[in-house]
Image: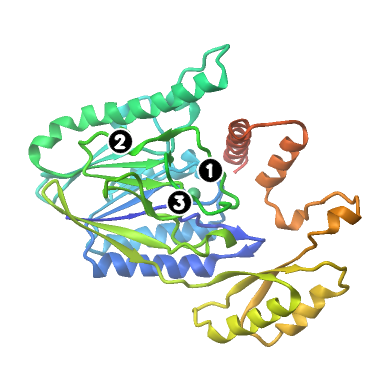
C-alpha cells in the first residue's frame, strides 16, 4: 500500500490581491499525475484545503474536478480533514455524496470520536488501512472552559486535551492492530519543535495547542500533519511529518522546498518514505539591497528564470535618503524583463531618527486578519497566546457570518 500525504493547499488564496488560480491548476495537475505515476492507493490531505471559509467558485470547481479525476486513477481512497482556515460546514456539505466515491471528509470534530476513525476497505470489503482522521481541533473540542483559569492552566489543559484525543483514538483503533494493517493518524496542529518560515504570512501559527512527537501513540505507523507550511520531520522518529504547503503561499516561504510525502507500507510496517519535490510553477522572489544591488539582482534573476509562469518579485530598496519616483524608476527598469514587480518597498533605516512620522501600514498590502491584529495590538499589550485566541475567534466569526450570508 502507498499513501500520498499532502496538506495546506489554501485554494483560492490571493497574494497582494493577485489571483493564484493558474498556480493551483498546475499544482493539482502535477499532484494528479504523481498519484497516477506512483500508483498511490490512498491520498491524505491534512487540512487547509481552502484559504478562506467562503472560497471563490473557481477554487471549489478546481477541488471537485481534482477529486473527480482521482476516481479514474489508482487512488482508491481519499481522506480530507478540515484545517483552521477551512469552514467545517462548507467542507462537510457534500460529505455524504463524496463518501459514495470513497472520499472521506472530516470538516471538524463531532461529539462522537468514532466518527474520526475511517476504515478503508479493499474491493473484497476487507479492511486494508485505518485512518485516525483528526481535523483542526478548536478550543471547544478540547476542553470545557472553566472560570478563573489562568493562561498557563488553560494551555496545560488544551495540551492535555490534544494528547487525550489521540490516546482515545488509539484505543478505538487498537483492535485493528491484529489485522497487521497500517493505522495512520492525521492532524492539523502545531507540533513542538516545528519550524515555520520567518513569518508565515496570512497564516497565524500558534504555539499553545501543541504536542510533542513522543505524545503520539506508538500504534500509529505514520502521522500525517498539516498547519506548518515548511515540510519537516518532527522529533527523532521518521514517521511523524509535515508535508508543508503545495505552493509557496508568501514571500517568506520561497526558500522552502515544497514537497509531498509518499509512504510505502508492507503490512503495518513502513518500508520507505519518499519526499517528492513539487515543481515551482511560479517563483516568488524577494530582492533587497541598495538600488544598484537591486538592479543588478533583477537583471540576473530575469536572465536565469525558467519557470512556467512569470515570476512575482518583491523589491525592498535600502536607502538613506529620499528618492523621488523610485517606484517608476524600477518599473521602467524591469519593463522588458520576464518578471512582474508586485511590491516595492523603501526601507530607510535612519528615518526614525530624523522624522517622527508614525509607520503607517499600507492597507493594500494587508489582509483583513492582519488589520484586525494591528487593531488589537494597538489597543494594549497582548501576549502571543492572547493575540492568537482573538484571531481564531475573529476567524470563527468571519466563517460564521459567511455561512449565514452565503
Ligand atoms: Mn495552512
Q: Is disc 2 surrounded by few (<14), some (14 to 19) or many (20+) residues within 10 Å?
A: few
When asked about the image quadrant of residue 179, the answer is top left
- Residue in the picture at 53% in, 82% down: 305
For the residues labelled 1 and 2, say whether their Cβ atoms are less than 8 Å apart.
no
SS for callout 1? loop
Q: CA distance from mark 1 to mark 3?
A: 17 Å
Please say if 196 is above or below 73: above
Give the residue number, with chain letter if any, for mark 2.
214
Rendered location of residue 64, percent (x, y): 41, 57
When asked about the image quadrant of residue 143, the answer is top left
Assign the C terminus to one quadrant of the image. top right
Visible residue check, residue 250: no
Rendered location of residue 117, percent (x, y): 26, 35
Q: Is residue 129 left or right of residue 356?
A: left
Give the residue number, with chain letter if any, for mark 3.
49
Q: For residue 205, which numbered disc appears in the image?
A: 1
**Mark 1 vs 3, N-terminal side:** 3
Rendered location of residue 269, percent (x, y): 14, 48
Q: Nearer the viewer, mark 3 or mark 2?
A: 2
- Residue in the picture at 37% in, 46% down: 225
Q: Is disc 3 surrounded by few (<14), some (14 to 19) or many (20+) residues within 10 Å?
A: many
Amino acid at each position: 500500500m502507498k499513501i500520498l500525504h499532502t496538506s495546506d493547499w489554501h485554494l483560492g488564496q490571493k497574494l497582494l490581491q493577485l489571483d493564484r488560480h493558474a498556480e493551483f491548476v498546475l499544482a493539482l495537475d502535477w499532484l494528479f499525475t504523481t498519484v497516477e505515476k506512483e500508483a498511490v492507493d490512498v491520498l491524505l490531505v491534512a487540512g487547509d484545503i481552502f484559504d478562506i471559509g467562503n472560497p471563490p467558485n473557481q477554487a471549489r470547481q478546481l477541488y471537485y474536478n481534482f477529486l473527480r479525476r482521482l476516481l479514474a486513477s489508482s487512488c482508491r481512497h481519499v481522506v480530507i480533514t478540515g484545517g483552521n482556515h477551512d469552514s467545517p460546514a462548507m467542507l462537510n456539505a457534500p460529505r455524504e455524496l463524496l463518501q459514495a466515491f470513497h472520499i472521506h471528509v472530516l470538516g471538524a470534530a463531532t461529539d462522537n470520536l468514532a466518527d474520526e476513525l475511517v476504515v478503508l476497505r479493499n474491493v473484497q470489503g476487507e479492511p486494508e488501512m485505518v485512518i485516525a482522521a483528526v481535523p483542526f481541533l478548536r478550543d471547544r473540542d478540547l476542553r470545557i472552559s472553566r472560570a478563573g483559569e489562568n493562561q498557563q492552566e488553560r494551555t496545560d489543559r488544551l495540551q492535555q486535551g490534544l494528547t487525550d484525543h489521540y490516546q482515545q483514538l488509539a484505543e478505538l483503533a487498537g483492535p485493528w492492530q491484529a489485522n497487521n494493517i497500517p493505522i495512520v493518524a492525521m492532524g492539523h496542529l502545531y507540533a513542538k519543535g516545528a519550524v515555520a518560515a520567518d513569518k508565515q504570512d496570512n497564516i497565524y501559527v500558534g504555539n499553545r495547542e501543541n504536542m510533542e512527537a513522543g505524545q503520539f501513540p506508538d500504534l500509529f505507523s505514520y502521522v500525517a500533519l498539516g498547519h506548518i507550511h515548511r515540510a519537516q520531520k518532527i522529533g527523532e522518529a521518521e514517521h511523524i511529518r509535515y508535508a508543508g504547503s503545495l505552493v509557496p503561499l508568501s514571500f517568506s516561504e520561497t526558500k522552502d522546498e515544497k514537497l509531498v510525502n509518499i509512504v510505502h507500507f508492507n503490512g503495518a510496517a513502513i518500508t520507505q518514505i519518499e519526499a517528492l519535490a513539487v515543481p515551482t510553477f511560479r517563483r516568488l522572489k524577494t530582492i533587497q539591497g541598495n538600488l544598484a544591488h537591486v538592479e543588478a539582482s533583477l537583471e540576473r534573476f530575469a536572465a536565469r528564470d525558467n519557470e512556467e509562469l512569470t515570476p512575482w518579485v518583491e523589491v525592498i530598496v535600502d536607502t538613506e535618503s529620499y528618492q523621488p519616483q523610485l517606484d517608476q524608476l524600477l518599473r521602467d527598469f524591469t519593463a522588458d524583463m520576464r518578471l512582474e514587480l508586485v511590491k516595492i518597498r523603501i526601507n530607510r533605516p535612519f528615518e526614525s531618527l530624523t522624522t517622527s512620522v508614525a509607520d503607517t501600514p499600507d492597507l493594500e498590502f494587508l489582509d483583513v486578519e492582519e488589520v484586525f491584529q494591528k487593531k488589537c495590538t494597538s489597543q494594549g499589550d497582548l501576549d502571543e497566546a492572547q493575540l492568537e485566541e482573538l484571531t481564531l475567534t475573529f476567524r470563527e466569526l468571519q466563517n460564521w457570518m459567511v455561512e449565514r450570508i452565503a
